[in-house]
């Protein structure tokens, strides 16, 4: 049983995922990091050298490999939901949670990220604001369709979002299933 976080880039999947994994006492995995580690390159370098299709293929492989492992929290890349095959597998792996962040928050985080690191490759030649607005609009229905549960992050800190998700897992009975999987696999963090 896995807790899978989906949502647009910079919506907080990795930050919330690490907090949630610690609270659940299960490992945290990030499909983007798994791709980077397997190739020894950053996503920006992968996309620049090989293109988005190549990256998406490696992303699919990372998700498939994670499916074979025990209970964990998995933060997916923002575009993981573009593949119906990915979505089907994610839904079989566990509960899919959409972190629905406001457009303004996403743009603010991406601008800060671009200034500090420049690690996220753009999808188009448009400005960051134009690109984010257009691509997010195209993906919202995909996130909605993939999600078993949606968490609005507006005005909430990462610890608050993680706590809200934890409470949902508890109230829905999913936490009991996760604990059962932990006990079977001997996960002890």
Image: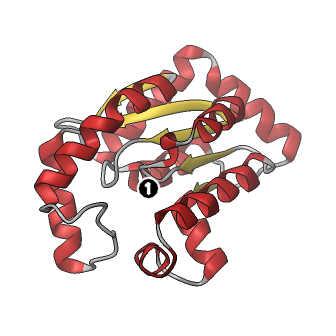
Q: In the rendering, at what x and y percent does residue 58 appear?
A: 63, 63
Which residue is painted at 66% across and 49% down in the image? 26
Which color mode does the image show? secondary structure
Q: Is residue 54 left or right of residue 128?
A: right
Q: Give the mark count.
A: 1
Q: 173 above or below 3?
A: above
Task: Please name whichever residue, 54 or 186, is drawn nearer the observer in this view of the structure.
Answer: 54
Which residue is painted at 25% across and 36% down in the image? 137
Q: Considering the numbered disc 1 on the image, is that residue within a helix, a strand or a loop?
A: helix
* Disc 1: CA contacts within 10 A as few (<14), some (14-19) or many (>=20): many
Q: Where, quadrant-wise, is the N terminus in this rendering?
A: top right
Task: Please name whichever residue, 53 or 189, is drawn nearer the observer in this view of the structure.
Answer: 53
Task: Please name whichever residue, 181 or 145, is drawn nearer the observer in this view of the structure.
Answer: 145
Q: Where, quadrant-wise, is the C terminus in this rendering?
A: bottom right
Q: Is residue 115 visible?
A: yes
Q: Is residue 155 left or right of residue 120?
A: left
Q: In the rendering, at what x and y percent does residue 154 appear?
A: 19, 35
Residue at the limit of the structure toward the top, as seen here: 172
Which residue is painted at 65% across and 31% down in the image? 88
Q: Which residue is mark 1?
A: 14
Q: Is residue 106 visible?
A: no
Res 122 quadrant in image = bottom left
Q: Is residue 31 left or right of residue 166?
A: right
Q: 108 above or below 6?
A: below
Q: In the rendering, at what x and y percent does residue 151 appear?
A: 36, 29
Which residue is painted at 62% across and 79% down in the image? 39
Q: In the rendering, at what x and y percent does residue 120 appear?
A: 33, 69
């Amino acid at each position: 049983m896995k807790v899978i976080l989906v949502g647009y880039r910079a919506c907080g999947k990795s930050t919330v995922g690490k907090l949630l994994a610690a609270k659940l006492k299960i490992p945290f995995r990030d499909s983007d990091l798994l791709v980077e580690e397997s190739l020894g390159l950053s996503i920006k370098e992968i996309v620049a050298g090989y293109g988005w299709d190549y990256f998406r293929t490696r992303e699919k492989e990372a998700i498939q490999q994670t499916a074979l492992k025990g209970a964990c929290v998995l933060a997916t890349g923002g575009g993981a939901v573009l593949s119906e095959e990915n979505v089907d597998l994610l839904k079989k792996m566990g509960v899919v949670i959409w972190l629905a962040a406001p457009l303004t928050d996403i743009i603010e985080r991406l601008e800060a990220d671009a200034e500090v690191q420049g690690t996220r490759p753009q999808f188009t030649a448009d400005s960051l604001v134009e690109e984010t607005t257009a691509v997010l609009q195209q993906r919202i229905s995909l996130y909605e369709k993939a999600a078993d549960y949606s968490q609005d992050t507006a005005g909430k800190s990462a610890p608050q979002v993680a706590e809200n998700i934890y409470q949902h897992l508890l109230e829905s009975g999913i936490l009991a299933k996760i604990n059962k999987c932990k006990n079977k696999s001997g996960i002890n963090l």
